[in-house]
Image (cartoon, rainbow, N blue to C red):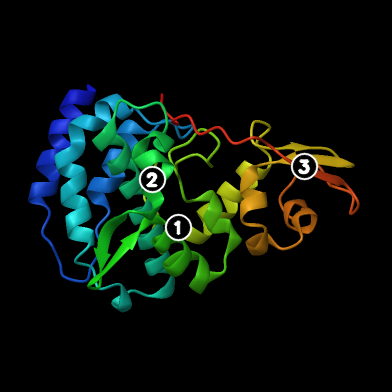
Amino acid sequence: MHAAVKMILITFGIMALPWQPNAQDYKVYDKLLKTYVDPNGKVNYKMLTKEKTAINQVLDQWQKVNTQKLNEKARLAFYINLYNLTTLKVIVDHYPIKSIMDIKRGKIWDVDLMVLNGKTYSLNELENQLIRSPYKEPGIHFLINCGAKSCPPLHAEAFTEKNIDVLMEKRTRQFVNDVHSNTITPKQIKISKIFDWYQTDFGNLILYINRYSSTKISNNAKITFMDYDWDLNKQ
């Protein structure tokens, strides 16, 4: 189906969806992902800019969700979806740009962008206060997408309470073994800067990576980190 036709259907579809208080709905978001994100996690931002109305309507609805009424897994899925869609919104609102770092002089993560349960949050606050702190699950770093090439690929499907555990395990394994993100040998590893920035989440890096890597690493292997490419993850 032509992208323009899909865009019309997506925008029409959101208008037809009944809103249920305290019930998150991912139908439109899922359509957006499947239409504009390819299997490698690259985004067609040029076409996605035509979906600003749909994106804004979804985010407006999501801000009405009472997250306290969601179970633990549903809440985590909701927060990660919210983070990723808000990031898409920020980029399409400023597109064309080369990098998300071009927005607000690289400080977009500290700008208040959403309201949840009556409190305003920035992307950093959403990640650190509502995702990292309560869940203490390092695998979330492979589901969250910051819109950069070096970020773990954006998954072209909404996360839900039913799929989040399986997808977290799958996406973690894929990222660890991605030769563009990490170079792993038994005696030396050069790994994503994400492992450096969030080392407190991962604990012993060699032990953590050995859980997922197809190449087993020596306990005394040398560890260095990749440079981070902030260019857009665009198609």
Quick one: SS at disc 1? loop
Residue wearing tag 1 = 163
| Left or right of 169, for residue 79 | left
Q: Nearer the viewer, mark 3 or mark 2?
A: 3
Which is more N-terminal, label 1 or label 2? 2
Q: Say if mark 3 contacts mark 2, CB within 8 Å.
A: no
From the viewer's side, name the closer residue of 183 and 103: 103
Q: Are marks 2 and 1 in contact (CB under 8 Å)?
A: yes
**Does residue 162 show up?**
no
Residue found 81% across the figure and 42% down from its top: 215
Q: Earlier in the sequence, mark 3 or mark 2?
A: 2
51, above or below 80, in the image: above
Give the amino acid type for the residue marked by disc 3 in the picture.
Thr
Whole-percent x and y of residue 182? 70, 37
Residue farthest toward the bottom in the current orientation of the protein: 69
On-image quarter of the N terminus? top left
Viewer can see residue 139: yes
| Residue for badge 2 | 157
What is the number of the mark on residue 224?
A: 3
Q: Say which label, 1 or 3, has the lower sequence index.
A: 1
Alpha-carbon span between mark 2 and mark 1: 10 Å
> Disc 3 on helix, strand or loop?
strand
Disc 2, SS: loop
Tell me if 104 is positioned left or right of 41 in this view.
Answer: left
Question: In this figure, what is the number of numbered marks?
Answer: 3
Q: Position of residue 41 (x, y in %)?
A: 46, 35
User: Amino acid under label 2?
Assistant: Glu
Crowd tier of the residue under label 3, counting other residues whose Cα lies within 10 Å: few below 14, some 14–19, many 20 or above: some
Q: Estimate the x, y position of residue 121 in percent, counting from the top left.
A: 32, 63
Q: Say what amino acid the circle numbered 1 marks.
A: Asn
Crowding at dot 2, Cα within 10 Å, few <14 / some 14-19 / many 20+, comes out as some
